[in-house]
Amino acid sequence: MSLLKRRSFLKKAALAGIAAPVAAASNLPSPAIAKEKIRWSMTTTWPKNFPGLGTAANRLAQEIGRASDGRMEIRVYGAGEIVPAFDALDAVSNGTVEMGHGAPYYWKGKAPAAQFLASIPFGLTAQEQNAWLDFGGGQELADEIYAGMGCKFFAAGNTGVQMAGWYNREINSVSDFQGLKIRLPGLGGEVLKALGATVVNLPGGELLPAIQSGTIDAIEWVGPYNDVSFGLHRAAKYYYAPGWHEPATILDSFINLKAWQALPADLQAVVENATRAANQYVLNELMAKNAEFLRILQEKHQIVPRQLSSEILKNIRKESDTVVKELAAQDAVSKRLYDSISAFQAMSAPWSALSESAYLTARGA
């Protein structure tokens, strides 16, 4: 090959080498346009970073951020940082913040049906409750209730069976509730009112001072894990089971309805899946931690939990049936919610008895 031809060949090869990657690059997809980052605030009814309940809100926010690959950022505020605990739903519905975390019975003054959603005395277990939400029409009813308050509803935690509470006097008969001043929210509080107790509703951060000062005689909160975290074992002598009033209590994540509707579909799916994860995680955590802290109460603090007698529970159950039905009949939404839950319980109870209850009896301690 002559020198001239060789130079011509090399020049063409070089040009071809440059053209190839240019052509290839022209076939690549255009770089994705960066999507706008969404920053929300969440206010809760719990003290900042409170174990189990407060940290459930933190975990929910973290999961939304992780699952959205950082497109959604949720900043969590404890009770009192933006608004007081029981003003959380107002702050969300009026758009002060986009999101909140609490428990449905805190909103019974705005929507009486909300207390039936939280938990019904002698009602659904946590497994039954979750099944009702997904397969018994519960989610749709809850959405209807919360839409009336300007919010979107998600279950974002469950306590499972709670304890009956801490008392400064023994409960040996149903008459011992007469004149008792007790912190007990929701429908359980209405039942004890009917039995002669004086019932008050206090946020978690006010519990210990109230019983230490004698403002109240008894406190119901959740179970060993959260109760020890508040130091309730230092303020009352008698610790009773079982939690007839709250066999499974939903924690709610509520989102400003306009903010929810403005989210793109993929981020709505992220939020929904994150709340499902939080719902199960809280139940798992409280199962593990309550078992651990029950041992701490017994071995370190010499607290021996007591069982309410079968006679006391029988009388409470009788009163509960009357009180809850009467309250449900006071408005149409409460009645529909109560009827839905009752029907699902009637359907699921035989299987729960044949499976869970029979197994636990067979297993013993």
Image (cartoon, rainbow, N blue to C red):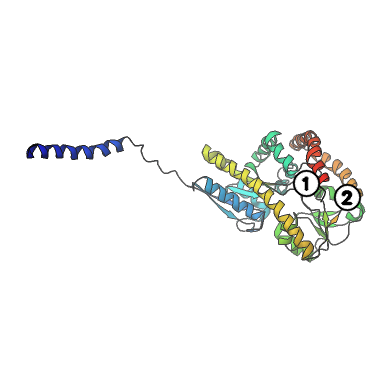
Density class for disc 2 (Cα within 10 Å; few <14, some 14-19, many ≥20) is many
Q: Nearer the viewer, mark 2 or mark 1?
A: 1
Say which amino acid is labelled 2: Leu
Most foreground residue, 92 or 218: 218
Q: Which residue is mark 1?
A: 247
Q: Which residue is mark 2?
A: 195
Disc number for residue 18: none
Name the element at disc 1: loop
Q: Is residue 14 left or right of residue 353?
A: left
Mark 2 or 1 closer to N-term?
2
Q: Is residue 92 visible?
A: yes
Where does the image place residue 81, in percent across and percent down from the top left? 61, 58
Which quarter of the rendering shows the N terminus? top left
Where does the image place residue 347, in percent across and percent down from the top left? 78, 33
Where does the image place residue 134, in percent across and percent down from the top left? 67, 36
Density class for disc 1 (Cα within 10 Å; few <14, some 14-19, many ≥20) is many
User: In the picture, residue 54 is in which quadrant?
Assistant: bottom right
The residue most toward the front is 1
Most foreground residue, 90 or 259: 259
Up-down: is 15 above or below 216? Answer: above
Residue at x 64% of width, y 42% of height: 154
Where does the image place residue 7, in percent across and percent down from the top left? 11, 40
Q: How many marks?
A: 2
Say which amino acid is labelled 1: Pro
Up-down: is 142 above or below 48? Answer: above
User: In the picture, residue 353 is in which quadrant?
Assistant: top right
Q: Is residue 88 left or right of residue 340?
A: left
